[in-house]
Image (cartoon, grey):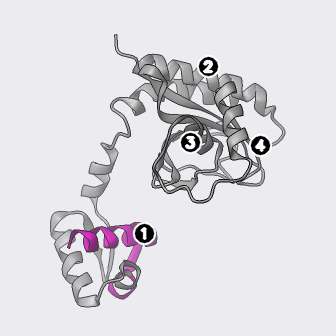
Amino acid sequence: MLDGAFALLEAVQEAQEAGLTALAAAGGLPKTTAYRLLEQLVELGAVERHGVNYRMGSRMFRLGREWQPHPGLRAAATGPMQQLAAATGATVVLCVLREGRTLAVSGVPGMVDDVALVQPGATWPWTTAAGKALVAVTPSSAPLGPLPGSWRQEASVIRDSGMALDREALIPGVCCAAVPVTIGRGRAVGALCAMVDPSRDVRRLAHAVERAGRAVDARLRPG
């Protein structure tokens, strides 16, 4: 039952708003089962009924806002992210790895919003700069898929330099620099990523991102 309910929640999130038939198909459920689960989710406030369609409910919004990939991470990153965006004009994103993908936790708008608008909860392949910064320093059991043949050497370079760079590898017109955010003994709990257009010096940007990352690290460090 829980599997079915979560499948429907994911279908609602993906569609934003859809009817019973579409959601049942997306969730891989019979319509009668989907209807029963959706009505239960409506009663709980997790889903809202809008005419004959369903959309995400306010209770999921409230609960989702409280999610933390690591205690205090979002609060620790907010100030340094805003300062980094103001100093560089970059679109700045705090990311984590989940289910083998890069997941945006929070962001500050910047120069590439027209081609890479970041919304909390958005995901990309792990092969973003932020994803590479995390995979390179953190042993992961997440399903990453086949690793590129050059990954071992690239990961070594990222560990040595402390940063990962991306020059339009994922999105045309977007270059990225990312550093891991760490706590005690260098354990990475997230990555800070800045995105700019190709006219900017991404290596110079990377040093600004590195300074912001250290500021987040310091705020996370107890005492």
Is residue 18 on the magenta stretch?
yes
Residue type at numbered disc 1: Gln
Q: Quadrant of the N terminus?
A: bottom left
- Local crowd at mark 2 within 10 Å, few (<14), some, or many (≥20)? some
Mark 4 and mark 2 in contact? Answer it, CB < 8 Å.
Answer: no
The local secondary structure at tag 1 comes to loop
Please give the label number shown on residue 197. Answer: 4
Looking at the image, which residue sits at the far right? 199
Dot 3 or dot 2, earlier in sequence: 3
| Drawn side of residue 174 relative to residue 40, left or right | right
Q: Residue 16 — which label?
A: 1
Label 1 and label 4: CA atoms lie apart by: 30 Å
Q: Which is the main secondary structure of the residues drawn in magenta?
A: helix
Residue on which the image places disc 2 = 211
Find residue 178 and report its horizontal and vertical position in percent.
63, 35
Q: Residues within 10 Å of mark 3 (few under 14, many from 20)?
A: many
Horizontal side of residue 198 vs 160, given as left or right:
right
Which residues, given as a range, are shown in magenta? 1-22
- Residue type, mark 2 in image: Arg
Marks 3 and 4 close (CB-CB < 8 Å) = no
Tell me the mark number nearer the camera, choosing from 3 and 4: 3
Along the line of sight, which residue is nearer the eye, 181 or 200? 181
Residue drawn where x is 52% and y is 55% of the image:
123
Callout 1 crowding tier (Cα within 10 Å): few <14, some 14–19, many ≥20: few
